[in-house]
Image: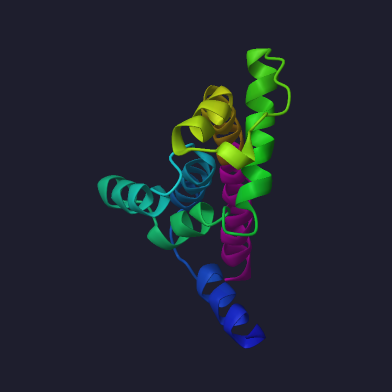
Amino acid sequence: MLNKIKSKIKILMSINESPKKLALSFGIGVFIAISPLWGLHTFIGLGLALLFDLNKLVLMIGIYVTNPWTVIPIYTFTTWCGIKIMGKNITAISIDWKNITFSSFFEAINIYLWPFVIGSTIIGIIAGLVGGIIVYYYFKRRQLLRIIAT
């Protein structure tokens, strides 16, 4: 398994595209990953990659920042940020688990909908920008080192 990971990293490091395109691809991927459009990330990412000629591999790596192990902490944090941004004072949800229905469950969690949307959108923009800047400078430095080495 470790060899498989190493080979994937080698593929990623051998990408020969402009640092700007790689950074844009990764930044957009991270934004999509954290965006509130949960469940549609891959479709949106592939559509944007085709539409704007982005690097699909790098964009998908950005999108899969959220995965089964990270999705709960990320969305909990972004919802908390949304609550703070909106200035809401939300207490714990009170759900009658013995008499729960589909509609009563969604009524109870509905107070978190807008904080989730606003928080994940704003944090997604920030994370996408930061991730894109990091990737840009990393690949720009690699490009300069290649030029110096030749």
Q: Residue reaching furthest left?
A: 51
Would residue 69 be found to the left or right of residue 44 on screen? right
Q: Quadrant of residue 18?
A: bottom left
Nearer-the-camera pick, 108 or 129:
108
> Between 87 and 61, which is closer to the camera in this rendering?
87
Residue in view at x 45 percent, y 58 percent = 60
The colour scheme is rainbow
Q: Look at the image and say whether residue 36 sits in the magenta stretch.
A: no
The percent position of residue 4, horizontal first and vertical second, equals: 58, 84
Count of marks placed on residues? 0
What segment carries the magenta color? 129-150
- Of the 4 image quadrants, the one containing the N terminus is bottom right
Prevailing secondary structure of the magenta residues:
helix
Query: Which one is in front, 127 or 70?
Result: 70
Outermost front residue: 99
What residue is rendered at 33% in x and 54% in y? 46
Q: Is residue 61 left or right of residue 2?
A: left
